[in-house]
Amino acid sequence: MIRSFPMNNMENRFTLQFEVQQEMLLREAIALWGISKRTLTAIKFDGGEILVNGVERNVRHVVVARDIVTIIFPLEEASDGLAPQYGELTIVYEDEAFLVIDKPAYMSTIPSREHPDGSVANFVLGYFQQKGLPSTVHIVTRLDRDTSGLLCIAKNRHIHYLMSVAQQQGNVHRQYEAIVSGEAISQSIVEPIGRKETSIIEREVRQDGQFAHTDVEVIKYGRLNGCNVSHIRLTLHTGRTHQIRVHMAYVGHPLVGDGLYGGDQQVINRQVLHCVSLTFQHPLTKEVLSFRSELPQELSNLLK
């Protein structure tokens, strides 16, 4: 099959096109490309189009081999609570489907009550508007405010859905580097995580929590501010809130700078955690995309 994702020249709408290989109902052909029922409903009723060889058809139409199906997705609108802002983004990769950025520390991924603006979502929405892209912001991988590194954003609800499925299947791979207190060991931590009853923010290991799996690999040992520390690499197999921070605190090695979970804040007032690697298969081209980000100077200086 031939598939592409050009943007509609008139409205910059996201468009998916493919060639049918055998006779089937149009809705069956569409299902092969992972379009959810919710997205299909939006295409049908919110201004999208489904064309066969350039002619609009309904999903009961029978397509045959070599027919060209074009799906034009409806325009998307940002929520009223998300205001566009304009500033610099460190863009690592961009195509019609994705935006991968290198997020600095002290920037929230999405607005919150404590930080209502200045988030990644605010700046990405402003970037989309500057480029004339009628899309809202679909966060695929999220980072805590004080965690830096690679973050993936989808430009379309369909891509967001496909990536959510890939995450659930364990096909979005992320690695982090951190500095933790004490002499850690390489290990797998498989402990459930849930919200702490006395806090709306803090999480903890608890038996009624959600399954969580983190692999820990020691890179090297060192000293920081007169104390033993470990430079470690972490691989996430699940994506629970504060997962790395909770797991490392649970095994007695909280992240340096992580005051919420008992980390030493004498040399830095944010957790020393950076997403260094992000790898996934592009859901349209099937190409494996892999990105890397070096530790920011603020953190690498601690390792000297």
Image: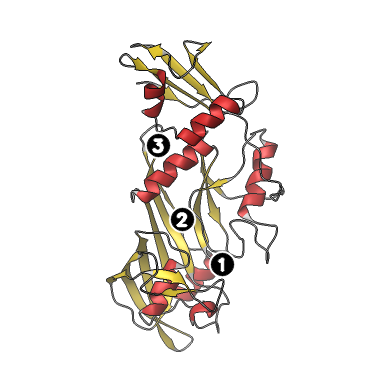
Q: What is the number of the mark on residue 283?
A: 3
Does 85 sit left or right of 1 as displayed? right
Q: Amino acid at mark 1?
A: Asp
Q: Amino acid at mark 3?
A: Pro
Q: Can you give x and y, in whole percent of width and height, for residue 252 in the image?
A: 38, 82
Between disc 2 and disc 3, the foreground one is 3
Look at mark 1 in the image and give the residue it sits on: 146
Q: Amino acid at mark 2?
A: Ser
Residue beneath the point at 34% across and 21% down: 1
Residue beneath the point at 63% across and 46% down: 124
Does 103 sit left or right of 130 as displayed? left
Q: Can you give x and y, in whole percent of width and height, for residue 220 in the image?
A: 33, 74
Q: CA distance from mark 2 to mark 1?
A: 16 Å
Q: Can you give x and y, in whole percent of width and height, for residue 76 in the image?
A: 62, 35
Q: CA distance from mark 3 to mark 1?
A: 30 Å
Look at mark 2 in the image and give the residue it sits on: 293
Q: Earlier in the sequence, mark 3 or mark 1?
A: 1
Q: Residues within 10 Å of mark 1 (few under 14, many from 20)?
A: many
SS under mark 2: loop
Q: Can you give x and y, in whole percent of width and height, for residue 158 in the image?
A: 49, 36
SS under mark 1: loop
Between disc 3 and disc 1, the foreground one is 3
SS under mark 3: loop
Can residue 44 be seen in this snapshot? yes
